[in-house]
Amino acid sequence: MTDLVSRDASHPLRHLAIIMDGNNRWATLRGLTGIAGHEAGVERIRGVLKATKAHGIEVVSLFAFSSENWQRPEIEVTGLMSLFANYLKKEARTLRDDGVRLKIIGNRANFSDSLLKLIREAELITASGNFTLVLCVDYGGRWDVVEAARELALEVQMGRLRASDISEETLARKLQLQDLPDPDLCIRTGGEERISNFLLWHLAYTELFVSDCYWPDFGPELLDQAVAEYYSRKRRFGHRRSVAELPAEAGERQNVKT
């Protein structure tokens, strides 16, 4: 792992985002209920967190429940909310003991009072952790940007801010991730090649890695593969590649043209 990190020390992998897809398909292949697939997916989180720490990653953001997931069958939504509540009850102290700070982002307006209480307690219990686990629950990237824009509009309306002072930085400070760095790498399991309204603002220059593996089967060895792929890439953030970075045949073509 040290060799992987040293390949591009200028852009270390600090923040990993994961779209945990394929739980239902994993369960269907095994003749299980959809909620059984989600239960297996929750169990997978523990091992992946341990593996990310070994890679020196500081933040992991998991897309646990999107704002569109409310449209799923009621029995599935109820089961997912129950899984979320049980995770908070069972894991909060373990996370604290492992040095993990839990941060929940998303629209909390649809949560029950009892779930809101569990969220507050879990975040308080784990507040001293130096590794951050972000659970994105009832989260949508468009919703996040709209809410940030609404907050800025209110500040302008109240005279606390001038419209001309609004910049990318001021808007970013109103987003749900706020003080956390943007993800360096986003992994999507289940083979789908889209980001599904996940962290739209933050993924602007994030490296993407798609795995055909369903989330309940995504183990440390596949995480190692994704991390290795990340460090094999050149991150330019919109800048042009130098001639030294071009494949040999591309450099030859350029020399012919000149």
Image: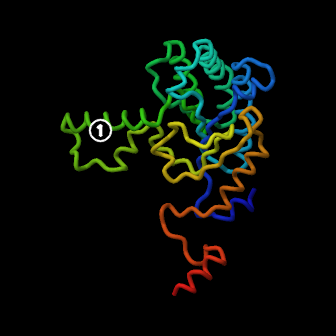
Label 1 crowd bin: few (<14), some (14–19), many (20+), radius 10 Å? many
**Quarter of the rendering occupied by the N terminus:** bottom right
* Res. 232 image quadrant: bottom right
Residue 139: % across, % down:
50, 30
Count of numbered circles on the image: 1
Q: Residue at x 50, y 44 (%)?
A: 180
Q: Nearer the viewer, residue 144 or 210?
A: 210
Residue 165: percent from the left, percent from the top?
25, 49
In the rendered image, the vertical position of residue 111 relative to residue 162, given as above or below: above
Up-down relation of residue 66 to residue 113 (above or below): below
Taking the image as shown, residue 97 lies to the left or right of residue 203, namely right
| Dot 1 amino acid type | Leu
Q: Residue at x 51, y 87 (%)?
A: 258
Q: Nearer the viewer, residue 217 or 220?
A: 217
Q: How is the image coloured?
A: rainbow
Up the image or down, 8 lies above or below 29; here it is: below
Q: Is residue 131 visible?
A: no
What residue does disc 1 label?
152
Residue 2 at what x, y percent from top left? 74, 59
Residue ID at (81%, 24%): 30
**Residue at x 65% of width, y 18% of height:** 86
Dot 1: element: helix
Residue 188 at what x, y percent from top left? Answer: 64, 41
